[in-house]
Amino acid sequence: MSVSNITILGLQWGDEGKGKVVDRFSSNVDIVVRFCGGANAGHTVVVDGPEKNETQFILHLLPTGIIHPEVRCFIGAGVVCDPVSLFEELDDIKSRGIDWEGRLFIDYTTHLVLPQHKACEKYSENINTKKALATTLRGIGPTYADKADRIGITAGDLADDDRLRDRIDNFIKKKKPFLSILHDQNLSSPEKLHEFLKPYAYRIKAMLTDVTFELRKAISDNKRILFEGAQGALLDIGLGTYPYVTSSNTTIGGLFYGLGLPPGIQGEVLGVVKAYTTRVGNGPFPTELKDATGERLRKSGDEFGATTGRPRRTGWLDLATVRRTAFMSGVTGIVITKLDVLDGLDQIKVCIAHRYNNTLFDFPPLYSGFMEKVEPIYEKLKGWQSPTAGITDFEKLPVEAKNYIKFIEKTIGLPVKYISTGSNRKAFIEIS
Ligand code: IMP
């Protein structure tokens, strides 16, 4: 089995800067694959445009590799695909000169996000705003719920109109009690849903494939694959800070489950960790900073959601949880992103353990019932005053920044292999 594949996963609450990292490695692979989540993700890539002007792509559902003309891209069965977002993104990249036809494939069993899912999510998020999860409102949770309930409609269903009508009838019948409280006739009408899906059916049909088969074939042809994670480990539906999580498996298991591939296929597993912590949405956040330092991180890190525009909550790096999430996914190397955002701080705190009921946990449980109550135990490190932004050579970093990186390595027992020092593709350090 090929081990030259590469997997890129977030080890915090998402928004670690995976987009840039995936983009960086996409030029060395043949295939980029998404295996979990949907258009709730927001992967930002900044590239040099014509005359060296910077141009930015924000991808939600498309694998980041799509902006590399030689790369084939796959959306696996573990993803939920919103046809509206899909074609908005495809039309956008096309208008910006990226030819994607013949390079993007979707598994027959990838579930479709429907207007009903978005409407149901909006309703349930508004029922009790105090207990709202503050989701991205992209219909992700309800789509996975209907998948588990076996009433979902998949991309493959679009290829056969009789089957599609049948699946739509079943879906609407079974959902009717819930849809009726939304007071929107259109949402309870099988005809309207068919009308909505029909234009997409024609376009999606050409992309349908058996992703497991294609990737197996690619592997035997010695093609190199990049597996692109979405969100972060702490948002994993089963292993994260439930219920404040997304609805897919964002840790390594999601790769095998979401693509039908066996363990071993993942190759090198790079865990992406922001030099501090952010989270969007509600839920426990032990190292959160609600003060001027938190505001400073938000401003200099431009911490506003790529999908929703919401301000992100900010806080110190929590290595106790990263130690755990790196272990859970068998991470072999760490990528530290946004190091430059810490430039100019006098002191930087790093959480090395959680205290709960007078017990110290250096491998803390993620159960939110505990996490809401823990006290973070900090180590204080000296900050650096000269800028790291744009530095590409580890040796050129200020000594305190090097110490910060070494401290991370020592605390979690894994090598930091790459450091990102800015949003541009080139602001990247490879540590040999
Ligand atoms: P959902 O995935 O839209 O259902 O949202 C569930 C939780 O996951 C919310 O707290 C979201 O803010 C969070 N979330 C979902 N996708 C992302 C992401 O790409 N980055 C960061 N947080 C996310």
Image (cartoon, rainbow, N blue to C red):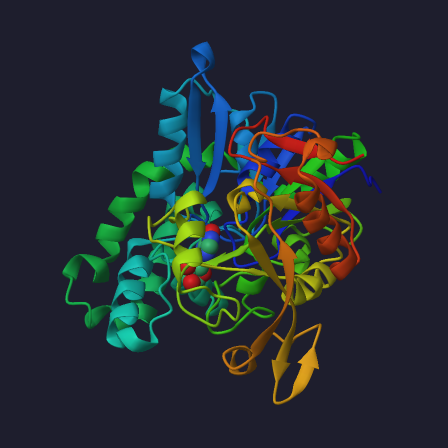
Query: In this orientation, does residue 101 appear?
Result: no
Q: Where is residue 24 in the image (x, y as percent from the top left)?
A: 62, 31
Q: In this view, does 189 lie above or below 287?
A: above
Horizontal placement of 185 versus 272: left or right? left
Q: In this view, does 319 lie above or below 160?
A: below
Asked where in the image residue 60 lies, by quadrant, the reply is top left
User: 113 or 384: nearer the eye?
Assistant: 384
Quarter the C terminus occupies = top right
Q: Is residue 313 above or below residue 49?
A: below
- Determine the residue located farthest toward the top in the rendered image: 51
Q: For the point 75% across and 30% down, which residue is it?
A: 223
**Which quadrant of the render holds ligand 1?**
bottom left
Q: For the point 40% across and 63% down, which residue is it?
A: 291
Q: Position of residue 2 (x, y in %)?
A: 82, 39
Q: Where is residue 167 in the image (x, y as percent from the top left)?
A: 39, 57
User: 419 or 244: nearer the eye?
Assistant: 419
Quarter the N terminus occupies = top right
- Determine the residue located farthest toward the bottom in the rendered image: 357
User: 218 or 206: nearer the eye?
Assistant: 218
Query: In this orientation, does residue 92 appear?
Result: yes
Horizontal placement of 97 versus 3: left or right? left
Q: For the point 78% across and 48% down, which residue is it?
A: 415
Q: Position of residue 356 (x, y in %)?
A: 61, 84
Disc tally is 0
Q: Is residue 308 above or below residue 29?
A: below
